Image: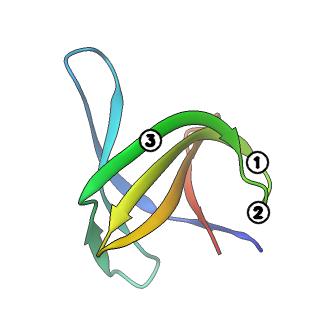
């Protein structure tokens, strides 16, 4: 597996929490994040790397979205 870096539109809550709203793939397709089920610091066991792992529901599928310490977003490919 590899990291697939994606563009993310995110907002900060009034409590200062970073919350992703949508992702855009390299080919330009965008997907809204319907729901965030969990946020925790975790490693990607498939692609490597450590950061904040967002367990997201996108188009009725659960996906992990990672925010690395270098300020880049990725999904496991």
Residue that carries the numbered disc 1 in the rendered image? 49
- Residue 38 numbered tag: 3
Other residues around mark 2 within 10 Å, as few (<14) / some (14–19) / many (≥20): some
Q: Is residue 51 left or right of residue 27?
A: right
In the image, residue 14 sits, relative to residue 19, either above or below, namely above
Q: Is residue 28 left or right of residue 50?
A: left
Please say if the residues under marks 1 and 2 sit with CB atoms less than 8 Å apart: yes
SS at circle 1: loop
In the image, residue 54 sits, relative to residue 77, either above or below, namely above
SS at circle 2: loop
Q: Position of residue 4 (x, y in %)?
A: 61, 69
- Residue 47 numbered tag: 2
Please state which of the two labelled residues, at mark 2 or mark 3, is closer to the viewer: 3
| Residue drawn at the location 26% of the way across and 14% of the way down | 15
Q: Position of residue 73 (x, y in %)?
A: 53, 52
| Residue drawn at the location 80% of the way across and 55% of the way down | 48
Total number of numbered discs in the rendering: 3
Give the mark nearest the N terminus, 1 or 3: 3
């Amino acid at each position: 597996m590899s990291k697939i870096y994606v563009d993310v539109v995110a907002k900060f809550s009034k409590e200062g929490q970073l919350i992703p709203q949508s992702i855009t793939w390299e080919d330009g397709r965008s997907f809204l994040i319907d729901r965030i089920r969990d946020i925790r610091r975790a490693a990607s066991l498939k692609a490597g790397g450590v950061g904040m792992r967002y367990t997201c529901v996108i188009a009725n599928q659960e996906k992990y979205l990672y925010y690395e310490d270098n300020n880049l977003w990725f999904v496991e490919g």
